[in-house]
Amino acid sequence: MTDQPRTLALACVAASILFAAAGQVLLKRGVTALGPLGSATRGARGIARRLFGNVPLLAGMAIYFLSAVLWLYGLSRVELSYAYPLLALNMILVTFGARYILKERVSAFRWAGIALIAAGVALVASS
């Protein structure tokens, strides 16, 4: 594979990871706005109405779908053993999104785990 297609494939993998993290934050924002599902809404029709009327939830689903399409493109051109460990970046990005966008509390132990994940991703990326 020449450098240009590989660079494009890696860019798609990176974009996929970013979009997946953004999608997760939007999904969480959307379901938080809805409150607990099931108990307050009776029947599948009521749940569907609540889900599909929620803009952050729909945006999260759309962005997550785009992430999957980009992932498939990148995966068709990059080794799985290289690309898949990079998905751990999602854990890092989602944790930052949870902390700074959703204002969730993140303990020191979680940050330590995130640091270990970052070290692992750096090892894989340098290989």
Image: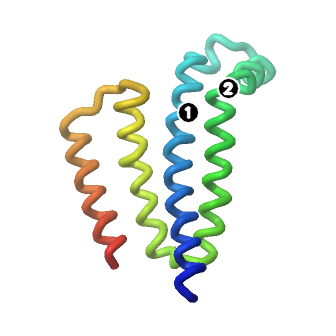
Q: Which mark is residue 55?
A: 2
| As drawn, 63 above or below 87 | above
What colouring style does the render use? rainbow
What residue appears at the point 42 percent right and 26 percent down from the top-left corner?
102
| As drawn, 61 above or below 120 | above
Q: CA distance from mark 1 to mark 2?
A: 9 Å
Q: Is residue 30 left or right of residue 17?
A: right
Residue 118 screen position, x and y as percent: 29, 57
What residue appears at the point 59 percent right and 25 percent down from the top-left corner?
30
Q: Is residue 79 left or right of residue 68?
A: left
Q: Which mark is residue 26?
A: 1
Circle 1 Cα neighbour tier, 10 Å, few/some/many (<14 / 14–19 / ≥20): many
| As drawn, 21 above or below 42 | below
Q: Residue furthest front?
A: 4
Judge by depth and name the residue closer to the eye, 77 or 8: 8
* First along the sequence among labels 1 and 2: 1
Q: Quadrant of the C terminus?
A: bottom left
Q: Amino acid at mark 1?
A: Leu
Q: In which quarter of the view is residue 15 placed?
A: bottom right
Q: Residue furthest top?
A: 40
Residue 37 screen position, x and y as percent: 61, 20
Circle 2 Cα neighbour tier, 10 Å, few/some/many (<14 / 14–19 / ≥20): some
What residue appears at the point 51 percent right and 74 percent down from the top-left corner?
80
| As drawn, 12 above or below 105 | below
Secondary structure type for disc 1 = helix
Residue 99 screen position, x and y as percent: 35, 31
Q: Is residue 81 left or right of residue 66?
A: left
What residue appears at the point 64 percent right and 65 percent down from the top-left corner?
72
Q: Which mark is residue 70?
A: none
